[in-house]
């Protein structure tokens, strides 16, 4: 699929570019293809148009990177812009300074609110936010049973009242029950409703006024079509949503709704539901979503290729340095680590490597948290220390450990690991050898 | 619920289309201007028709105007409606359930998560009961927490017998038991609820195939109907859903749900362009009576905002 796009784009652009810059005609030609892709991915019509205008503005007149085909370069611009339009940074749940944090989950029927409530409870429990569930869907048969079962599965308390019709009173009592249970986060699972159902929307505005929630999260089906704009607008106008959770993203829907919903509400997409299991809730990564909308990872390979040419110099510098007498320093080490983090959870990255299978990963103890610790330790060092780790005597190690909030043992461990790596790198330093952590890390 | 439906603010697609495309009478003579074409495309795309179906329709109109077959706005309106009606209609009566030659008629309900399978079953059961059938429900969604209880609540409300599976049980076994129960009870129709599953989950699609296979072994010719439930708000993924469910269990028709909102269910146009999967029923609300038999001409008119 992507090959088709790439060749179409390149074909169109090759004919039209000669002067070393992307010309307006060339860009317009290429954007026609991008437009088709966005619309097929269910990005709203209006947003697609605005988006293309922005890309055109950015692309026209850009210097053509020599070793990259113009089509590829255009796709990179599109990709970057798409990431920007998806909200760029990850956005966690905003917890209240004084607990409990009250979170309302709202959305259409069947968007996955109850399942998401269970998943979010599981996640918050792991994050030690002491979650508690309130079953406020008094309409759908057995909705409360479903939430209660999920609560049991994740070992989180559930407040439910059978036969109760006054949702506001029910939720108030639920929050009280949460307080008694010493919970610090209260997840309220509300009934599914259409955004044009005035009576039902009034129930939510009353609820909002009564319990002053810290987060109102719109749970939206990732497969939604053009209606996503109207749905998001309706809920946002009535309630002022603070975030979005996109569900059913483990299928083959390209998820253009993400773009539409963010475009309308500017409320960050916080999580993505990626499966039936209760663990299957992931933080939202705009870069991955952008790749998906432009049809899966294929485009990422391309973007990486374009990026690689830019990073080529840096890679060369590193390669030279690695084989030099002095070797890489901790600053380079950190850079390589960061590059890896960009690729996503370590386990996923390892899974992409040829020859690594899921069985091996099961036993591999890869910890993303550790990467963060490494980062903290390196950043607690002075520039001189980073450049020459041999400077690290006992008192320096103690200072760094304190600064990073880690133990001295961990600092020692890191330093010895680094030494080992340095040695290996020097040994492997024949021309053309790839860096284990370098920018050419196989992406996919 | 019904008064809520009447409040729905579907903008008239056709009135907008007329406004943007045809205010300039001269445009009819000269053919469509580029801006008009874009405006028309927009209207169709915003209704989830998808690029291919939209391009087909726009090209048909352009051609008709150029050849002088479409002379005024009424002609154009009729042409779009006729084309859509053709595309969406099927030779058989959508409301007629294919009956078993002997023994109970078995209806299998499938679809992705959250599309409204269980609610649709309640509606279908109500309709068939009214037609004099003795309906038995089978709660074979043993996966989702509370799914069995949800269908049991409906069975209770509708006064229907139900065979339920245990949580985590084998859905094929539940279906088998339900068929056996139907025979002893003298039920004439069995409607089997299955767990929601994304069409891309091979393991779960295999499970669904197994349910169909087991039913077929127990009662030759069954399931007599396999209805795929499609969320009316879904976008272009509808086509993929249709294709993969068709490969797995060859559905005999579609139920399109959630049409009481702002979504028009236009992605069925994209779906029908690729698959001969007739639309049978429409879900238009949360009550047991909110089920309509599909009428292609009326649906087409609704899509164009004429209804």
Image (spheres, helix red, strand yellow):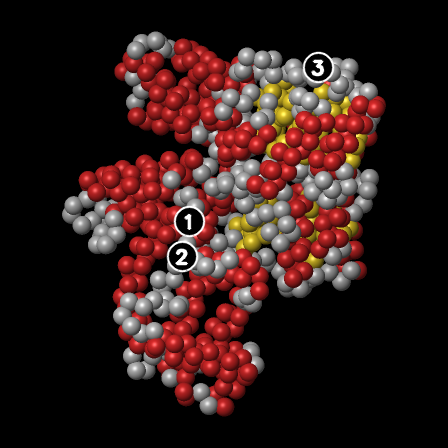
Spatial CA span between label 3 and label 1: 51 Å
Q: Secondary structure at mark 1?
A: loop
Q: Nearer the viewer, residue A339 or A234?
A: A339
Q: Quadrant of residue B133?
A: top right
The relative height of residue B6 versus residue A149 in the rendered view (above or below) is above
Q: Residue at x 45, y 57 (%)?
A: A352
Disc 3: which residue: B101
Q: Secondary structure at mark 2?
A: loop
Disc 2: which residue: A443
Residue A350 on image: x %, y %: 48, 61
Disc 1: which residue: A297
Give a yes or no on whether discs 2 and 3 share a subunit.
no
Q: Quadrant of residue B117?
A: top right
Density class for disc 2 (Cα within 10 Å; few <14, some 14-19, many ≥20) is: some
Q: Residue at x 54, y 57 (%)?
A: A358
Q: Chain of mark 1?
A: A
């Amino acid at each position: 699929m992507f090959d088709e796009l790439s060749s179409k784009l390149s074909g169109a652009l090759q004919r039209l570019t000669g002067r070393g810059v992307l010309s307006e005609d060339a860009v317009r030609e290429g954007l026609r293809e991008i437009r088709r892709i966005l619309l097929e991915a269910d990005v709203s019509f209006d947003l697609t148009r605005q988006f293309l205008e922005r890309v055109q503005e950015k692309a026209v007149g850009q210097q053509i990177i020599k070793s990259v085909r113009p089509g590829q370069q255009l796709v990179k611009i599109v990709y970057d812009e798409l990431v920007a339009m998806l909200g760029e940074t990850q956005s966690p749940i905003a917890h209240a300074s004084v607990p409990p944090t009250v979170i309302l989950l709202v959305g259409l029927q069947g968007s996955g609110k109850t399942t998401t409530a269970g998943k979010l409870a599981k996640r918050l429990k792991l994050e030690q936010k002491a979650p508690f569930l309130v079953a406020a869907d008094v309409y759908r048969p057995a909705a409360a049973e479903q939430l209660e079962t999920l609560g049991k599965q994740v070992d989180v308390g559930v407040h439910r009242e059978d036969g109760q019709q006054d949702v506001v009173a029910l939720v108030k009592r639920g929050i009280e029950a949460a307080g008694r249970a010493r919970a610090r986060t209260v997840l309220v699972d509300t009934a599914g409703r259409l955004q044009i159902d005035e009576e039902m929307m009034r129930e939510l505005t009353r609820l909002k006024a009564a319990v002053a929630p810290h987060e109102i999260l719109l749970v939206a089906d990732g497969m939604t079509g053009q209606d996503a704009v109207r749905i998001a607008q309706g809920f946002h106008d009535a309630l002022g949503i603070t975030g979005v959770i996109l569900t059913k993203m483990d299928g083959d829907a390209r998820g253009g709704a993400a773009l539409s919903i963010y475009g309308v509400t500017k409320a960050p997409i916080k999580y993505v539901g990626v499966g039936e299991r209760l663990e299957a809730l992931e933080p939202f990564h705009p870069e991955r979503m952008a790749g998906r909308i432009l049809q899966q990872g294929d485009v990422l390979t391309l973007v990486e290729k374009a990026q690689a040419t830019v990073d080529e110099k840096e890679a060369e510098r590193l390669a030279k340095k690695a084989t030099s007498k002095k070797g890489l320093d901790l600053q380079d080490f950190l850079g390589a680590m960061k590059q890896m983090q960009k690729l996503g959870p370590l386990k996923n990255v390892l899974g992409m490597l040829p020859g690594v299978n899921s069985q091996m990963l099961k036993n591999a103890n890869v910890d993303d948290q550790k990467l963060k610790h490494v980062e903290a330790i390196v950043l607690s060092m002075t520039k001189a220390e980073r450049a020459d780790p041999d400077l690290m005597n006992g008192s320096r190690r103690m200072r760094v450990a304190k600064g990073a909030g880690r133990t001295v043992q961990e600092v020692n461990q890191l330093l010895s690991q680094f030494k080992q790596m340095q040695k290996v790198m020097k040994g492997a330093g024949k021309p053309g050898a790839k860096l284990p952590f370098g920018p050419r890390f196989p992406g996919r | 619920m019904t008064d809520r439906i009447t409040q729905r603010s579907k903008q008239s697609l056709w009135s907008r289309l007329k406004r943007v495309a045809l205010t300039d009478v001269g445009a009819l003579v000269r053919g469509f201007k580029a801006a008009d074409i874009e405006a028309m495309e927009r209207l169709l795309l915003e209704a989830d028709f998808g690029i291919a179906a939209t391009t087909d329709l726009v090209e048909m109109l352009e051609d008709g105007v150029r050849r002088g077959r479409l002379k005024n706005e009424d002609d154009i309106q009729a042409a779009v409606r006729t084309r859509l009606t053709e595309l969406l209609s099927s030779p058989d009566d959508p409301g007629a359930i294919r009956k078993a030659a002997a023994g109970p008629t078995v209806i299998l309900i499938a679809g992705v998560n959250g599309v409204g399978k269980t609610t649709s079953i309640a509606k279908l059961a109500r309709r068939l009961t009214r037609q004099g059938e003795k309906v038995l429900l089978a709660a074979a969604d043993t996966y989702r927490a509370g799914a069995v209880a949800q269908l049991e609540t409906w069975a209770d409300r509708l006064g229907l017998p139900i065979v339920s599976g245990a949580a985590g049980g084998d859905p094929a076994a539940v279906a088998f038991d339900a068929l056996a129960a139907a025979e002893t009870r003298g039920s004439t129709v069995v409607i089997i609820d299955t767990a929601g599953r994304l069409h891309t989950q091979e393991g779960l699609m295999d499970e669904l195939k197994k349910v169909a296979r087991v039913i077929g072994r127990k009662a030759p010719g069954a399931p007599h109907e396999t209805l795929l439930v499609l969320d009316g708000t879904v976008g272009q993924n509808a086509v993929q859903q249709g294709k993969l469910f068709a490969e797995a269990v060859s559905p005999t028709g579609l139920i399109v749900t959630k049409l009481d909102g702002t979504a028009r269910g236009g992605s069925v146009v994209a779906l029908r362009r690729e698959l001969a999967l007739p639309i049978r029923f429409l879900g238009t609300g949360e009550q047991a009576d909110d089920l309509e038999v599909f009428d292609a001409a009326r649906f087409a008119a609704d899509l164009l905002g004429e209804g």
